[in-house]
Image (cartoon, rainbow, N blue to C red):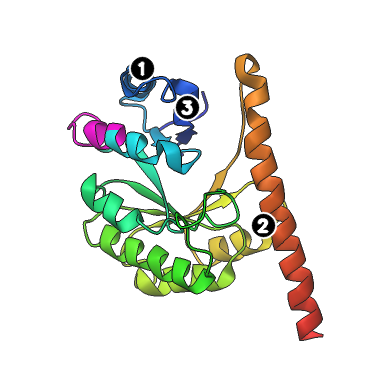
Amino acid sequence: RQMNHENSGNVSCKPTLYGLAISKALFLNHIEKVIDSVVGQGIEIEFDAENYVHIEDTFDVFDSLASTKAYTDIVRQAVQAHLNNIVELMDKYKLWDKNLRIVKGSGVYDEAGGISENIDDKIRQRYFAILRRNIMTGRTPFTATVRDRRLAESVIKITGQGSYPFEFQMLYGPLGRKLGQHLLGLGYPVRIYIPFTDDWCRDEWKAYGLRRAKMMRSLVVKSLKDGIKLG
């Protein structure tokens, strides 16, 4: 209710909560009602598939909506750079010139062997390749990170210190807060992602919460190890 043209609100939706696990038609029917409710209000609706099983159906529905003139600037798609075939999927569903949120994905999404890349440098290079292609179309990508200063510095360099518009997107909470404040101090936009659920689906947060808790533990352990190395 507080979102408007001044704060450019963005609501990220999990497709299966809107019926995708049952059918694409049901998801399209439900999510179109959500999108229609924000037309003209300066609010975006973002699609963020929970796992690889639903990636292609999510991309397909997103492409159909993003290719509709009335919805082009209202919808956004999260793309996971850790997926080995993400470039092929983005080609297939014509995502390059659409609104995107680019995420590394590693540490959050558990996928079967062969589907995802585990080497951080390779994921980063794929992340940056997606960023480069998207900004060249004139779109304003959201570049997501929790507390990766090196990744943030690379994003700034790739975008020509903001010559190509973009936004940093970070997760609400103590991890990464210092980095977010630093980026704001440099004059770059930082969007904060705040997870929430409603009473009717109060238990749906559990799987997401467990994924995030696992990721947070990994980040804390990595920080401790890095601190020991520096010491």
Q: Is residue 87 visible?
A: yes
- Residue farthest along the top direction in this orientation: 200
Q: What's the mark number on residue 177? A: 2
Which is more N-terminal, label 3 or label 1?
A: 3
Query: Rounded to the nearest whole Å, what is the CA distance between mark 1 and mark 3?
Result: 10 Å
Give the left or right position of residue 5, taking residue 95 as reference: right
* Marks 3,2: beta carbons within 8 A: no
Q: Secondary structure at mark 3?
A: helix
* Tag 1 residue: 26
Task: Give the amino acid type for the residue marked by disc 1 in the picture.
Answer: Leu
Q: Is residue 183 above or below residue 196?
A: below
- Residue 68 position, x and y percent, is 18, 31
- Residue at the front extreme, as displayed: 113
Residue at coordinates 49% horizontally, 41% vertically from top-left? Answer: 51
Dot 3 or dot 2: first in sequence order is 3
Query: Magenta stretch?
Result: 61-71
Q: Which residue is mark 3?
A: 16
Residue 48 visible? The answer is: no
User: For the residues carrying marks 2 and 1, which lies nearer the camera in this image?
Assistant: 1
- Between 55 and 111, the residue placed more toward the observer is 111
Task: Point out residue 55 in the picture as x, y percentages from the top left corner.
Answer: 39, 40
At which x and y percent is residue 44? 38, 35
What's the amino acid at mark 3? Thr
Of callouts 2 and 1, the N-terminal one? 1
Q: CA distance from mark 2 to mark 1?
A: 38 Å
Q: Secondary structure at mark 2?
A: helix
Of the residues tagged 3 and 2, which is closer to the observer? 3
Residue at x 78% of width, y 77% of height: 227
Q: Nearer the viewer, residue 48 or 113?
A: 113
- Give the residue drawn at x 45%, y 21%: 18
Q: Amino acid at mark 2?
A: Arg
Q: Position of residue 127 (x, y in %)?
A: 41, 63
